[in-house]
Amino acid sequence: MFRTLRRALCAVGAALLLPLAAVAPSAHGADGATGVVAADAGAGYWHTSGRQILDEAGTPVRIAGINWFGFETANHVVHGLWARDYKSMIDQMRSLGYNTLRLPFSDDILKSGTVPDSIDFSGGKNADLTGLTSLQVLDKIVGYAGQSGLKVILDRHRPDAAGQSALWYTSAVPESTWIANLTSLASRYAGDATVVGIDLHNEPHDPACWGCGDTSLDWRLAAERAGNAVLAVNPDLLVFVEGVQSFNGVSGWWGGNLMGVAQYPVRLDVPNRLVYSAHDYATSVAQQSWFSDPSFPSNMPGIWDKYWGYIFKQDIAPVWLGEFGTTLQSTVDQQWLAALVDYLRPTSAYGADSFHWTFWSWNPNSGDTGGILKDDWTTVDTVKDGYLASVKAAGFDPGDGGTDPSDPEDPGSTAACTAAYTVTSDWGSGFNADVKVTNTGTTAITSWRVTWTWPGAQQVTSMWNASYTQSGATVTAVNAAHNGSVAAGASASFGFGGAPGGGGVPSVSCTAA
């Protein structure tokens, strides 16, 4: 296997290379609804019970979050503050239904006097960050996230801004420094339930091992040492432990191989604090053998079961997919993401008894995945975000984005729509299609419904930016919460995967309200 280099533009007009070592990679770097309210993430500190995470009242919660990177880079602060105010970023995350923020950092930000770079203070933007160190900016972001109802997971992403490390230590940043800095952060936020946990080290990979017993290489033993040190100073935190790359000769994504947990579980001194974390990516990051399997994407649930899903399914511990992402440019990547989201278990069907996740990334400047935001750092990639709608937290209400219901409608207005169905790819055993809904009436609509009947035996296998029901060969698709409101003459779109292929294009009807 091989590795791609990941590039992130770290300042206006400047580029920062996010270098990675070689072999079996992972990834990242990574106009939406506004004024809406997402579900609360869960009160107080969290703990585990079997495969679930519970809040302080014992209510199951689901991590449905986003990665916002930058503190681990040479900017020493989250990216995008050269374009926007950090509070508007967090508000937008909440409006889209994310309830948790994963913040990567490097040990550099704990060095005395480390200050952020590339923050725009003009016009009052980020005014309260003026003159602060990187750690003080982190305090501000955690504080506002908490006010907004977001939880925060701190991710020790790399030892320094120079790049990823295979092991949790380097010659410049020994294990003692790693643990001292983790415990420093755990102490810093003790008593602040916004910070619910720490991801001990990002993407351990070869030569890191799991269960080999060599204390210089055995990530499982290192995670126990660090996790217990963290819990000694802040026993309320969750400890997130990623996988490795290889176990018993079976290799996968960096940090994505948790096969060793079955034989060698992590042992922490404080019970009910351990969450296992995996990473998983698509072909925009690197090729893997399973993408070219003739049975793809039907083979993917078995792959995920083998590497990390069994931990959840056997009720060993909660599993958090801390990173996953793609540019969505290829059909394979689209199929991968649709299959993965389905595997993570739709919230409507399973509630919080589900896999936890934080998507990579909020940032558009993740070279091999892109982000939820587009390059202007404001506009939402609604297609990408739409894939995640079914696994966002229970109770998320993005609003209909429509007009004030107290405003009377123009009695002469009409609501009408048409739908155009296009097959975008067909590989015989399956296909993908897009449907474009156009408001052909004289007034804005607040909802739409599209119906078609296939002449054959096609079945919808996944759908994004809409929900659906299927009865026999007849499918009815209804707008998602974020794209039901369509101005006169404007359009909205949704897409889906189906099987088998060769179904052609059926006649489609559209109803608007």
Image: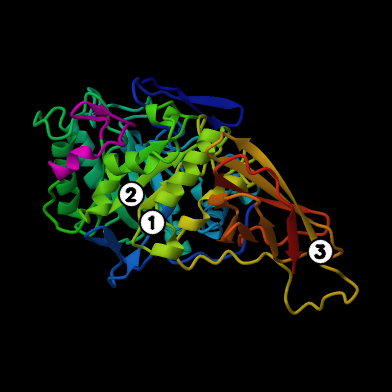
Q: Which residue is mark 2?
A: 320
Q: Which residues are magenta?
A: 244-265
Kind of residue indicated by mark 1? Ile
Q: Is residue 16 above or below residue 470?
A: above
What percent of the width, then of the height, locates residue 302? 33, 41
Which residue: 28% across, 60% down?
52
Badge 2 marks a residue whose secondary structure is strand
- Residue 63's tag is 1
For the rendered model, the colour scheme is rainbow
Of residues 327 and 370, the one nearer the viewer is 327
Q: Quadrant of residue 432?
A: top right
Using the image as rendered, state which of residue 410 and residue 136 is in the foreground.
410
- Amino acid type, label 3: Ala
**Real-space CA distance between mark 2 and mark 3, rounded to the nearest whole angstrom:** 43 Å
Q: Secondary structure at mark 1?
A: loop
Alpha-carbon neighbours of circle 3 within 10 Å: few (<14), some, or many (≥20)? some
Q: Where, by quadrant of the figure, is residue 469 drawn?
A: bottom right
Q: Looking at the magenta stretch, what is its main secondary structure?
A: loop
> Which of 14/303 is in front?
303
